[in-house]
Amino acid sequence: MPEGLEIDHSKSLNGTMAAYAEQVLICTGKDDWMSRIEEENSGDNLAADIKELLGRGGMYSDPYHNVSVTNASFPSSVPARSEIQTTSAYLLPSFKYIPFLPRVSFDSVQALVKGYLLPKKLHPAHASLSPIHRDRLTRSENQGKFLPAVQDVKDILVLICGHGGRDMRCGVLGPVLRNEFEQQMPKDNIRVMNGPVNIGDGQNRDVIESSATSDTSQSARVGLISHIGGHKFAGNVILYIPPGTKTADGKENALAGCGIWYGRVEPKHVEGIIKETILGGRVIEDLFRGGIRQGGEILRL
């Protein structure tokens, strides 16, 4: 590690994950970003647009419903009309993939927030709000229908904080861990997907490209992401295991539909994480920072 940026090996990791309701993962195709991701491209970016609506003072700001907005190294899907500028995003642990968010229309950001990111039911603390205010802060799933080709996520997602623009501990470890996961996964019959998610043309557009074959092999995408908190616990890794994922012996994975946060991950841990957590459905207690289940339930040991 860089001098003066040591890893904290003294504090317990359990419970160091900040609670959140949803994580928005914006596909930027870049491996690193400015310290504040909303300042990328002079503020013209999807993270800034979402935070304008959900952040402090925003139209949909809700202190009882935390939405984490992060950038990812995954490239965006390419629309059929390549001249149209769009951005892709994952919503987790809802396990939804939004392939085409037009960058010239703020209406699409409104549809994303109102249709997918707001809570279906408000926190009891909002009971005193006016009906109009309560309605504004509540999800309207009809709004989400304005976004085309939304898909369920089928690939396992391995997200590694590599935000060197924020802290070099993650900047150093992130790429090393990504390489290690990409090298180790094929050994366990997990195909690593690279490149953008390919949404088929015409009538096939509602089918997301998947590497799943007729055998028991699984597919995964490994990417670097921006700041998630806890640089002193680098390497920080989040594993999102889609609903329906099986264990190595073909049984239901106990962690299917969950996001599992690990800290202090080193390359030597990667093989064990794949076998124990991804293929075995078991949490590694020594590395566990927290977790979340589909639906928003926070997991603690």
Image (tube, helix red, strand yellow):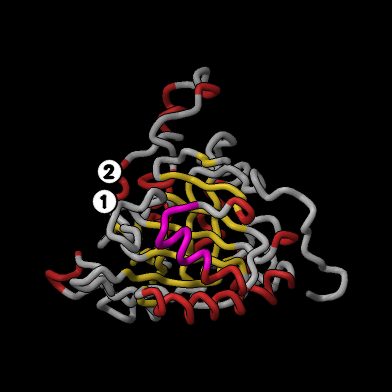
- Taking depth in this image into account, of 107 and 295 the one nearest to the observer is 295
- Taking depth in this image into account, of 91 and 7 the one nearest to the observer is 7
Question: Would residue 261 appear left or right of 96 to someone viewing this image?
Answer: right
Q: Amino acid at mark 2?
A: Asn
Q: Which mark is residue 145?
A: 1
Is there a contact, CB below 8 Å, between mark 2 and mark 1? Answer: yes
Q: Quadrant of the N terminus?
A: bottom right
Residue at x 40%, y 45% (from the top left corner): 294
Is residue 239 among the parts visible in the rendering?
A: yes
Q: Which residues are magenta?
A: 272-282
Tell me: residue 26, above or below residue 31: above
Residue at x 46%, y 69% (from the top left corner): 27
Q: Amino acid at mark 1?
A: Lys
Residue at x 47%, y 58% (from the top left corner): 277
Q: Is residue 202 magenta?
A: no
Q: Quadrant of the C terminus?
A: top right
